[in-house]
Amino acid sequence: MTLRPAYLLGVLVLLAAGAGIALQGDPAPAANPASVAASVQVSQAPRSTKPSAPTADASTEWLDNEAALMDNALYKAGRMPKSGCRPPSDRLRSSAVVIAYARVMVGCLNRSWKQLLTRADFSFYPPDFAAYKDKTSSPCGPADDGAVAFYCPENHKIYLDWPEYVTKRRDEQPYAQTALMDVMAHEYGHHVQELVGIGAFADDRYERASGDAQLEESRRTELQASCFGAAFLGADKQSLQLVGERLEGLQDDMSTGDESGGARDHGSEENNQYWTSSAFDSASPASCNTWKASAEYVS
Ligand SMILES: [Zn+2]
């Protein structure tokens, strides 16, 4: 095993009440001015394992990378099975409710992804889940300041900073719930990347690149995780009651891109919307091949 520079994939979702508030420069959802402003942002963090060390034959390894990322069998697995997900409708006003909600989401994601991955001949195991308050450590390193959720590939665990989702106001509830389902589906998307062999190869490419090229590798990974999440949410849109203001809230969450002036590691609002809306409508990871997309779709 080779210790490598850490690369933690995380999502930052900040909830703020009030019209027009943009946290860390992220645009507030325009469609719901009096609601929760949610922003999604990458956090870079450690990743220290990978399944395979680089081989002596760099050209062979490159071909393997290309195949795993661009021609992955997951893209041909078809439509995502519905899980029939029905998370609790209780208001997210305490840690217990937030954590219970997140655990239900993990269970739903397990059901759908297990079926789809098995269909495509991948082996499946569920991620672990842990909720924390403000700070935590993981085999991938500590949670970044500001990151409210992340996936650690080393122990296959999703970490959620639960206080970020606690909200007391009744009118914020629909948006707090859609933000929570979105972040869980996104982090689970990173777990799926690990299960199908994309994660390790994406990591290779990230580590070999630098500067703007490295940011583009990050965006391909992050946009795909969001896209996988959107495929799941699209399949379950009925049981998740994703209509009306809840659907608008989710669409705002899913299309939030890099904050202005911040690191360009998650992609533009336009491209987040492009990938997640496609996958939400198709309910299929066939819509999520960010590795074959030209640069303009992963900017
Ligand atoms: Zn992520």
Image (spheres, rainbow, N blue to C red):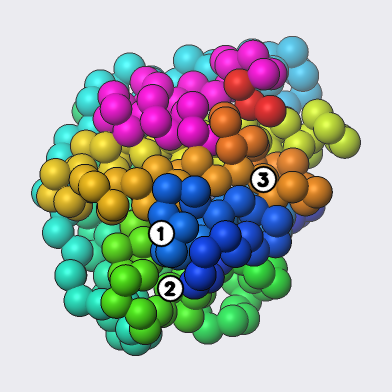
Disc 2 packing (10 Å; few <14; some 14–19; many ≥20): many
Lower position in the chain sequence, tag 2 or tag 1: 2
Amino acid type, residue under disc 2 in the picture: Tyr
Is residue 1 among what the camera can see? no
Residue 39 location, quadrant: bottom right
User: Left or right: where does residue 274 sit relative to residue 171?
Assistant: right
The residue identified by callout 2 is: 165
Disc 3 packing (10 Å; few <14; some 14–19; many ≥20): many
| Disc marking residue 258 | 3
Residue 256, image x, y percentages: 55, 46
CA–CA distance between discs 1 and 3? 16 Å
**Discs 2, 1 touching: Cβ within 8 Å:** yes
Residue 282 location, quadrant: top left
User: Left or right: where does residue 177 sit relative to residue 221?
Assistant: left
**Discs 2, 3 touching: Cβ within 8 Å:** no
User: Left or right: where does residue 110 sit relative to residue 48?
Assistant: left
CA–CA distance between discs 2 and 1? 8 Å
The residue identified by callout 1 is: 179
Count of numbered tags: 3
CA–CA distance between discs 2 and 3? 20 Å
